[in-house]
Image (cartoon, coloured by chain):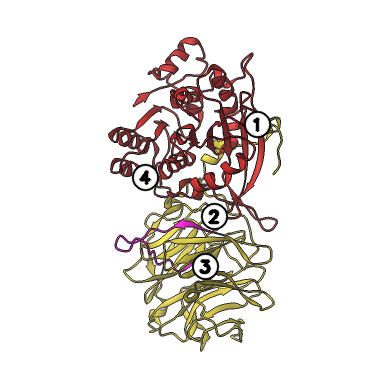
Amino acid sequence: MKKFYSTALLFLFLGLVTSAKAQDMPLSQILIEGEGWEPVTGHEASGRTFGFTDGLSTDADGNLYFSDVRSGNAVYKVDLEGKTSEFIPNAEGISGLQWGADGRLYACVSRQREVVVFTKEGERTQLAAPVQPNDLVVTYDGNLYYTQTKDKEIRRISPDGEMTVVSKDVVTKPNGITLSTDQGILAVSDHGGKYVWTFRIAADGTLENAEPYMEMRTPVADPEIAKGDGMATDAHGRYYVTTAEGLQVFDPTGRLCGVIAKPQDENLVSVAFAGPDHAYLYVACGQQIFRRKTKTHGALFFQEPKPAEAPPK
Amino acid sequence: MTRFLFPRGAAGAAALAFLIAFSSVAPAGEIDNYSPGPEASPQEGVPQGTVTQHQWTSEIFPGTERDYWVYVPAQYDKSGKTPTCVMVFQDGGGFVNEKGSFRAPTVFDNLIAKGDMPVTIGIFINPGVIPPAKEGQAPLKNRSFEYDTLSDQYARFLLEEILPEVAKDYNLTENPDCRAICGNSSGGICAFTVAWERPDAFRKVVSHIGSFTNIRGGHVYPALIRKTDPKPLRVFLQDGENDLDNLHGNWPLANQQMDKALTFAAYDHQFVLGNGKHSGKHGGAIFPDTLRWLWRDWKTLKP
């Protein structure tokens, strides 16, 4: 504890007016009037129907990647023209996907109880097994964090392949997982509670300072369970989380900005920014994927960490 | 409700008399045009207390770091034998700033010397941050989580961490009627939450431009107050007609709801609505009178 006398105070403070004016971030900063959810229909044109879309993720160009946990057998790609194709065949039961800075696609293969990584050519390398991964995020420096929902765990796979449990019994059902724009904060949604938890990623990759930093809106009929699921972050540092009530958005200080209605009355389980300039919100909602154009754009963790951009006036 | 304005420069005795009486003063036509009065400046012959700065790493808000300042009045019994009143401030750095809207240490000096408030130790605490782990990262701001959340966590932080730490050096009262808590905006609702959760520990509340809005559910307080067995609190609320109207709510309406609820439930309270914006200017201008009202019967209390 250090002490000094008050003469030094004169220089120090922006004071309370500054702190009282924390930036308000209403949904009107995100949504565009007249631009609602539209179904991504390219795959319907190809005659394919999906059972349970999940694992939405993007690359540097804005192509969308996703999986079908229930009836799919591939990683699918929606290109910028809106056409759907099989990107990696013979890849069943994937529940989480993300491109790493190394140009490889990391995946939670929940059905086969493993975490794997694919090259662009589809070559598959196992990173961990047997595990029960749900969703993952990969930092720019190559640390992979994934949720092992059933065991109330968050695990880390370090760049040299070592797996450790970095959080246990903090989040009831850890599910969706994302980062702050500067990649210093890990945020994890609770499928069995009403909070999104934040953690400081320590210099050694472990997790510290767990806090129930964001309180999700819950259904009136189930006031303790928000069913927090997939997560994303935008370039302004806002957090997006799919829930029973819709797509909930929080500002970087953990305050609810609002709830974006679901495109249809199905489970909303995954969200990503993709498309041109990564300015489209994509969600997996039941059998279908929907998107809507926004005024913001996604944070991309395979790119260098950066401070949150100031929100528009 | 009392409408109450303090125009810039009106520092004379007449204006002061109005202030003391909490009477209405016609708006000067300008919005949020308030400035600190004479009691926010050092007065000839008035002894000055000391302010020291400290740092704290919390366990209740795990790993958060913050600065806080302790004001000790010149009249404090240095033998340590006299339990002393306490007033805690959220966003403390703003309240101790000698060039800010409040200048609380100087106001304390002047009011204590006049006998308008008891000898009181001020504890001015900044909100916590979780510091970066690597260069280039931003600290995680814990302010909204600490101040806007409706729980006893911040009260426990005060009662289990900060007060015991300050009590190592000073004899602090444990009489809840001699403990006050004050804040602006989210710090204002935080002050109310601390007393609401722990009326056994804090019973005097000052809220300026208080965020009794839905930042994290704080808009429910008027409803809770009306349907809860009244708590033994004394509450001062200030707001301005031009305060915020945003996604979280409408501040002037929320504070009027608080005022009406406190009236309905027969709380000892005072509400002052000026024409200010979301700033500390009005609260700062009337701060000496707020303290006089808050501590008006202090001589009957035993710290």
In which quadrant of the rendered view does residue A103 lie?
bottom right
Instruction: Look at 47% across and 14% down and name the residue there.
Output: B16
2 or 4: mark nearer the eye: 4
Name the amino acid, label 2.
His
Q: Chain in red?
A: B
Cα–Cα gap, marks 4 and 3: 30 Å
Amino acid type, mark 3: Ile
Query: What residue is rendered at 60% in x and 20% in y?
Result: B41
| Residue pointed to by mark 3 | A177
Q: Are marks 4 and 3 in contact (CB under 8 Å)?
A: no
Residue B208 seen in the figure: no
Distance CA(mark 3)–CA(mark 2): 17 Å
Q: Label 1 lies in what chain?
A: B
Asked if the residue at tag 4 contacts the one at tag 2, i.e. Cβ–Cβ closer than 8 Å, the answer is no
Image mark 4: chain = B
Tell which circle, 3 or 2, labels the residue nearer the N-terminal end.
3
Q: Where's residue B168, x and y in %?
A: 63, 40
Q: Label 4 amino acid?
A: His
| Disc 2 from disc 4: Cα separation | 27 Å
Residue A37, percent from left and from top: 38, 64
Which is closer to the viewer, label 4 or label 1? 1
Labels in figure, total = 4
Q: Which residue is mark 2?
A: A236
Name chain A's colour.
Answer: yellow
What label does residue B51 carry, if any? 1
Q: Which mark is residue B219?
A: 4
Side of B268 where B175 appears, left or right: right
Magenta part of the chain: A210-231
